[in-house]
């Protein structure tokens, strides 16, 4: 009989109750991007800290920051055992556009084997699986097989602005051997995945102005340069029609990966058809010479994620807007440095801005790319636990997404990070009708239980080779 059997049995009997608790967690509209939701984030953090204390963790605390609070808890009674730092985030993306939701975003609805609601998959459901794994161990044996620190933040969706400074200030107090993060996707139902590479990110706001006020276009059209038109002209000159970025120096640090790595990625990663199906498209676009999986993981990219200027209401309004603004999102690959790229982009935008307009480029988020060694013993322990929980060998995959906290763990604490996702590729994270596949929630709990036990003394980790 395995030491994990009793916690696993407890988790099975409590499965329905765990889902109800997750619904309670999702009901907090903890939207970090909206200042008016600050109170809800504080309430959510307080609820989370109280819940961590209730499951048996110690020193459950809400930690204020200059922005939204962190939540910390620990259990450090496993003498001579490794320490696992469990990370997640309780903040969520804005729910808009609200009219596209089939049910209210913060009133979770269970439909067959899916739980619908904002944050269900990203990241409340995935991080909550680890909390329930801890509860299952503590309620059955009264102890954990390893030491555990939990650190949950409320600013991941806005770039983890205060997270890295907190890590740097509390480096010794957060001592651990490995970080585990569940904030990503599997390859599909019953097809687990561990992420070993993530792109970095650089989010900028580009603002273009002409005068102090909107002008009547009948009186001034043809004599005043329209900032909205100027903005579009600048953006169009930042990349080619197939997505190659035209900022001088942008690709200087981009390195081609080896043929062996590309072949490995082709075996493990998503196919072009799978990516197009997940995106709901019939024709692809982007950097030529690369598969869609390669374009979204090992190649940089530029997306215009928002643009505004002029009149947006119903009916006509004859104006030349005084100002226009765009949100630019660069995804960066290994060795590209976000702040260096920011300087290159800012300088190039200044060169592209005509004398008839003024532009300002503002940095909003900078996160480094991340690469995790696949053969690290702790990562292999995660792979073995994943195999046991899901009944299938996990694929090691790259992600085109970014997690600023993971980059901070690597840069500041120097810790390996096991990135084990429980979401599905079609969970519609960041979009209306976000959902979480409940069988994966329960398998995620099983993974958490098995991972703690694998690290807590099983020698079998070293006998498995997950490539």
Image (cartoon, rainbow, N blue to C red):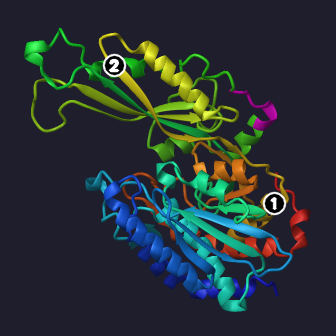
Q: Which residue is mark 2?
A: 358
> In the figure, residue 227 lies in which quadrant?
top left
Q: Position of residue 143 (x, y in %)?
A: 73, 86
| Magenta-colored span | 254-261
Q: Earlier in the sequence, mark 1 or mark 2?
A: 2
Can residue 244 be seen at all in this image of the molecule?
A: no
> In the figure, residue 244 lies in which quadrant?
top right
Q: Position of residue 431 (x, y in %)?
A: 40, 52
Q: Which residue is mark 1?
A: 380
Q: Quadrant of the N terminus?
A: bottom right
User: In the displayed structure, would residue 293 be above or below residue 224?
Assistant: below
Q: Which residue shows up at 42% across the image and 77% down it?
A: 24
Q: CA distance from mark 1 to mark 2?
A: 53 Å
User: In the displayed structure, would residue 358 be above or below residue 107?
Assistant: above
Can residue 443 be seen at all in this image of the molecule?
A: yes
Q: Position of residue 48 (x, y in %)?
A: 50, 74
Residue neighbourhood size for the residue with mark 1, other residues' Cα within 10 Å, grouped as few (<14), some (14–19), many (≥20): many
294 relative position to 383: left or right: left
Local secondary structure at mark 1: helix
Q: Which residue shows up at 10% across the image and 29% down it?
A: 317
Magenta span contains residue 81: no
Between 349 and 440, the residue placed more toward the observer is 349
Between 388 and 413, the residue placed more toward the observer is 413
Residue neighbourhood size for the residue with mark 2, other residues' Cα within 10 Å, grouped as few (<14), some (14–19), many (≥20): some
């Amino acid at each position: 009989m395995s030491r994990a059997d009793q916690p696993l049995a407890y988790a099975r009997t409590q499965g329905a109750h765990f889902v109800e608790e997750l619904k309670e967690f999702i009901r907090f509209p903890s939207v970090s991007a909206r200042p008016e939701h600050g109170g809800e984030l504080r309430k959510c953090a307080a609820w989370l800290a109280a819940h961590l204390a209730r499951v048996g963790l110690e020193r459950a605390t809400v930690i204020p920051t200059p922005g939204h609070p962190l939540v910390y808890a620990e259990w450090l009674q496993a003498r001579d055992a490794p320490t696992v730092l469990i990370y997640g985030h309780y903040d969520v993306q804005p729910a808009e556009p609200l009219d596209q939701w089939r049910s209210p975003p913060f009133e979770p609805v269970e439909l067959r084997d899916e739980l619908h609601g904002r944050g269900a998959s990203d990241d409340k459901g995935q991080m909550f699986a680890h909390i329930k794994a801890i509860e299952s161990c503590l309620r059955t044996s009264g102890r954990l097989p390893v030491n555990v620190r939990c650190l949950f933040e409320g600013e991941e969706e806005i770039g983890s602005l205060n997270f890295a400074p907190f890590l740097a200030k509390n480096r010794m107090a957060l001592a651990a051997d490995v970080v585990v993060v569940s904030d990503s996707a599997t390859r599909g139902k019953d097809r687990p995945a561990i992420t070993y590479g993530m792109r970095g990110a650089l989010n900028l706001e580009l603002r273009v102005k002409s005068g102090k006020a909107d002008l009547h276009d009948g009186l001034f059209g043809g004599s005043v340069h329209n900032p909205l038109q100027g903005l579009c002209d600048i953006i169009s000159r930042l990349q080619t029609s197939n997505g190659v970025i035209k900022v001088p120096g942008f690709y200087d640090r981009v390195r081609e990966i080896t043929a062996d790595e590309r072949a490995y990625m082709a075996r493990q990663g998503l196919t072009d058809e799978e990516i197009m199906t997940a995106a709901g498209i019939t024709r692809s676009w982007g950097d030529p010479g690369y598969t869609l999986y390669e374009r979204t993981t090992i190649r940089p990219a530029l997306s215009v994620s928002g643009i505004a200027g002029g009149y947006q209401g119903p009916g006509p309004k004859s104006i030349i807007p005084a100002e226009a603004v765009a949100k630019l999102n660069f995804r960066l690959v290994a060795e590209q440095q976000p702040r260096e790229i920011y300087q290159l982009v800012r300088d190039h935008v200044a060169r592209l801005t005509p004398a008839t307009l003024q532009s300002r480029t503002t940095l909003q988020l900078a996160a480094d790319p991340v690469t995790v060694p696949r053969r690290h013993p702790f990562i292999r322990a995660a792979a073995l636990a994943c195999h046991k929980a899901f009944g299938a060998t996990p694929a090691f995959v790259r992600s085109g997404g970014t997690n600023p906290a993971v980059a901070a763990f690597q840069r500041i604490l120097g810790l390996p990070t096991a990135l084990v996702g429980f979401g599905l590729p079609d969970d519609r994270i960041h979009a209306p009708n976000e959902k979480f596949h409940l069988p994966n929630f329960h398998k995620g709990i099983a993974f958490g239980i098995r991972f703690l036990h694998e690290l807590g003394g099983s020698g079998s980790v070293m006998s498995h080779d997950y490539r």
